[in-house]
Image: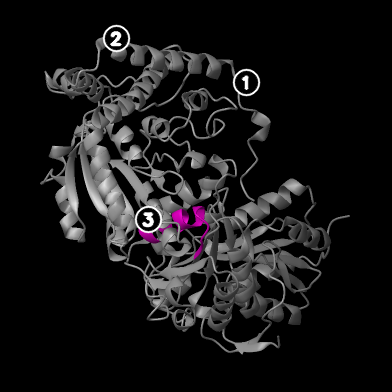
Amino acid sequence: MPDAQLTYAGAANAALDRALTERPETLLYGEDVAVPGGVFGVTKGLLKRHGDRVFDTPISEAAILGSAVGASMFGRRPIVEIMWADFALVAFDQIVNQAANVRYISRGRLSAPLTIRTQQGNAPGACAQHSQSLEALFAHVPGLTVAMPATHQDAHDLLLAAIWHDDPTVVIENRTLYHGEKRAVRLGGPVPGIGGAAVRRPGTDVTVVTWGAIQHAVLDAAQRAAAEGIDAEVIDLRWIRPIDLPTVLGSVRRTGRLLVVHEAHTVGGVGGEVVAAVAESGIRLAAPPVRLGAPPARIPAAPHLAAAVLPGAADVLGALRALAGDGVHGAVA
Amino acid sequence: MKSTTELADHLRVMHRIRFTEEAITALRAAGDVVGSVHLCNGQEAVYAGAVAALDLSVDAVFPTYRGHGWALACGVAPRAVLAELLGRAGGISGGRGGSAYFTAPDHGMFGENSIVGAGAPIACGAALAAAYDGSGRVALAAFGEGAMNQGAVHEALNLAAARSLPVLFLVENNGYSELTPTDTMVRNDQLFRRAAGYGMPGARVDGNDPVAVADAVGRAAERARAGRGPVLLEAMTQRIVGHYIGDAQQYRPAGELDAALAAEPIRRAEEALRAGGVAEAELDALRAAVRAEIDTAVAEALAEPLADPTTVLEHLYA
């Protein structure tokens, strides 16, 4: 199949279309996903093509998620949309206490192969209940699998991998990416398995581990740092659980420097997990590792206030300069 | 006589539940069973009656944490229930579920749930699957009346009604939301009347009469199987023990427990059978036979090896 020119939303739509076509046990439902085609238009056209396996639900996150758990225990493969990750908190019970326990407590007699599609993060004007980056909450829970696609191709591939995965998987998209430019997206081909980071920019001086939409700011900063002689390697984690540690450690072993950048709050965030894993690995660093994320504040609505809380490309560039600015590049021998 | 035979069958199940709960009480006192244990003494007619009206080869039951009785009524061996509470390898969930969260899918019993009301949306999912797999499955979500004030239950009732899902919502109304009288927590304690608000039939049933429960559940199941949607049943019963083992029940008004004991389903079933001409010796024999069965189950469960701690990392993912 030739590449298709698609937006990020279109790439996710293509993955859903393929899943509904190839796996008759899939169901696609959530608030406004069928007739309206999704509040962000991601599920547009799927009702028409796939009929009654695509349907709208009441504004009832516990019923959406709980029924997905139940249906998945009985041979269905539900793909449900939680419009905003913040809304998952209304029904976190069904994800953490229910879905994540099904296989373990039944010792594999039952499973819950369901996919939760959601999106998160700040966009201009969004209030504090529509702006959070909550991946650490999901990633903390054994039994869950968590993906954060940030490229067009990953919006397609990671979603397919999640749907094919036989355990509950949360796919966290980002609405600021949905309707940008179209890019070539490979469709067809084998469905990838879960896990695996991607090196977005190879480099030798600093390892930058990042994920989600903020990586585009990171790549921008890395480009500017390169002009200053700092060659940053940018790793997109892509899967927050499980984390691809071999890729991270392999890079840090070469660069000797680690910067982790995420939009989520730093305290209790996944960045701490990455730093801890590097520390535990025994790799000797040339400089103390740095986490860059949101400080302890709620996310204010006014764009200039939100910008004062959330890290941006300038912050990343500053961190890169501070980390690599001692002139010592590469790991300590 | 059919009704006598039917009631005797229910009585056997109710004895099995009661003697198992009494055995668990003793094992808890001896320290063999640890932790929080919620017994269902007094509510046995709900389980015996409801399960008798289902077809567990296809139907699915989603009970609460007060679920030993549900499991036993579904046909789980008392040994497997006891072994579960004892952390034995042969426990129904190999010691992973404990008293409040074991699951027996091979018996149509898809998990106790120790989050109040959480099983109701999950039951909707089992019913939703039935709309696509042609199984004719009916899902039964059972929960206490306290769960009727949980948001998840409201969402489930509405979703089931909106999509005409084959779900039976069975409220085990024992009068107490854990330790608090439910009539102090709601303005209208006729909970079955909420069904009208969802556009589904609702009815109260004598929850201490297994035949009445079976009749109501059977009719509701038939209706749901025919594609006519969910039903809300409120089975009026009482627990004749504490909310958990060790609950001093000081919240109970004087005389309430005595009245409950006079109305409890096993005593009532035996009285009805006596009145129907069943000889005392037969009732004694049934009781003794089930007691012996449970005594054996206790011994077998205690003799089983503990679940293997080296397996605790298994079955987290496929």
| Residue at point 45%, 49% (across, down) | B58
- Judge whether A311 appears above or below B92 on screen: below
The amino acid at mark 3 is Cys
Q: Position of residue B63 (x, y in %)?
A: 37, 40
User: How far apart in space, not on screen, are marks 1 and 2 (Cα)?
Assistant: 38 Å
The amino acid at mark 1 is Pro
Q: Which residue is label 3 attached to?
A: B124
User: How far apart in space, not on screen, are marks 3 and 2 (Cα)?
Assistant: 45 Å
Q: Which residue is label 2 attached to?
A: B281
* The one of B218 and A278 positioned closer to us in this rendering: B218
Element carrying mark 1:
loop
Chain to which mark 2 belongs: B
- Reply yes or no: does residue A100 show up in magenta: no
Quarter of the image with the C terminus of chain A is bottom right
Chain to which mark 1 belongs: B
Q: Is residue A153 visible?
A: yes
- Badges 1 and 2, same chain: yes
- Badge 3 density bin: few <14, some 14–19, many ≥20, Cα 10 Å: many
The amino acid at mark 2 is Ala
Numbered badge on residue B305 = 1
- Judge whether A21 appears above or below B145 on screen: below
User: How far apart in space, not on screen, are marks 3 and 1 (Cα)?
Assistant: 37 Å
A244 left or right, relative to A133: right
